[in-house]
Image (cartoon, rainbow, N blue to C red):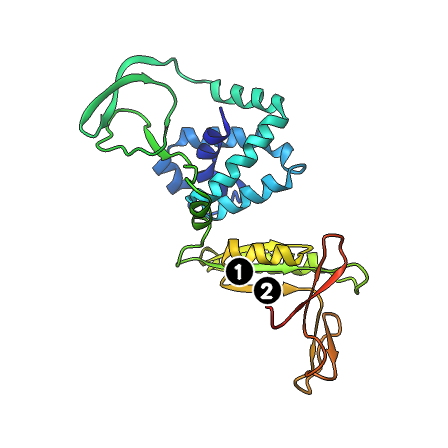
Amino acid sequence: MDSAQLTTLLAPWLPFLLEPERNGLEAAIAQLGKSPWQTAQALWTQLQPYLAVHPDLQTAIAQVATKPNSTARQTVLQEEFAALLSAHPELVTAIAQVMTRDRPTPAAGVQIGQMSGGTVAGNVQGAIFNISGSSITNLTGAGDIHYQEAPRQPNSASEAIACRLPSSSVKTILILAANPQGTHPLRLGAEVRLLRQEWERSPHRDDFELIDRSAVTTRDLQQELLQSQPHIVHFCGHGVGAEMSDEPSSSRKFTMVADAMTAPEGLLLETDTGQPQLVAAAAL
């Protein structure tokens, strides 16, 4: 099994593999079949020991779990799976054993359905047909037959960026955190974790996509704004600005300056070496 097949098989089940108590599993099994769910569980058991040492794979899995039908997110996950399988040949062997376990003997010449009005006869093997760039109509037959579109690679860089743009129905929240060297240490990890927990508990969580980035540099800022196209940006870190009211401010994160006309205002991000770099408010 290659990374594309692994992504296609796991994508619809990731929400339930990450959250076993999540509602909707029975409906998904009724739609996609019990056998694919059992296979996904077996594959997940093989993958779990590797997640802790592959944080980028963890992130890609979490992103697909929030939007399993996103082609762009599946493409990123497919790339991470490819890197994982390349680095761990023993995992390839384990996955192959899962896929061949209890597989029925293929039956040659069995009618499996109709494609665009024509009868298709061939070998029935497994329960999922991965078809890229094609459509199936009038698919009929006995047993568990399922259709899933395999992830399609973008044809160009512009299309790849367009695929990553959030849909109009889902709002993107981008959390940026920076605590440069030499500045007062902040518990940014705890703050981001609290924000993510509140998002996960929200009954409207499916209406929002949450992306967080730490140790943000000016280059990261530009890249994330262009790639994520966020509706809301939340910054965790230090800032410099002029005092505009008599209300007390948090010296933990915001340093007041007396003269708003001459003193710089902005956010403190990081350089590539972790040093503080002020991004002016005007530039933001």
Left or right for 75, reference 218: left
**CB-based contact (under 8 Å), mark 2 and mark 1:** yes
Numbered tag placed on residue 234 in the rendering? 2
Quadrant of the drawing holding the C terminus: bottom right
**Label 1 Cα crowd, 10 Å radius (few <14 / some 14-19 / many 20+):** some
Which residue appears at 54% of the width and 41% of the height? 61
Numbered tag placed on residue 252 in the rendering? none
* Image quadrant where residue 137 sits: top left
Q: Amino acid at mark 2?
A: His
Q: Earlier in the sequence, mark 2 or mark 1?
A: 1
Give the x, y percent position of residue 192. 64, 58
Left or right for 224, reference 128: right
Give the x, y percent position of residue 9. 45, 32
* Residue matched to label 1: 173
Can the viewer see residue 68?
no
The answer for how far apart the CA atoms under marks 2 and 1 are is: 7 Å
- The front one of 195 and 252 is 252
Q: Amino acid at mark 1?
A: Ile
Q: Residue furthest left?
A: 117
Give the x, y percent position of residue 215. 69, 55
Whether 245 is drawn above or below 215: the answer is below
Which residue appears at 70% of the width and 75% of the height? 264
Dot 2 falls on a residue whose secondary structure is: strand
Q: Residue furthest bottom?
A: 246
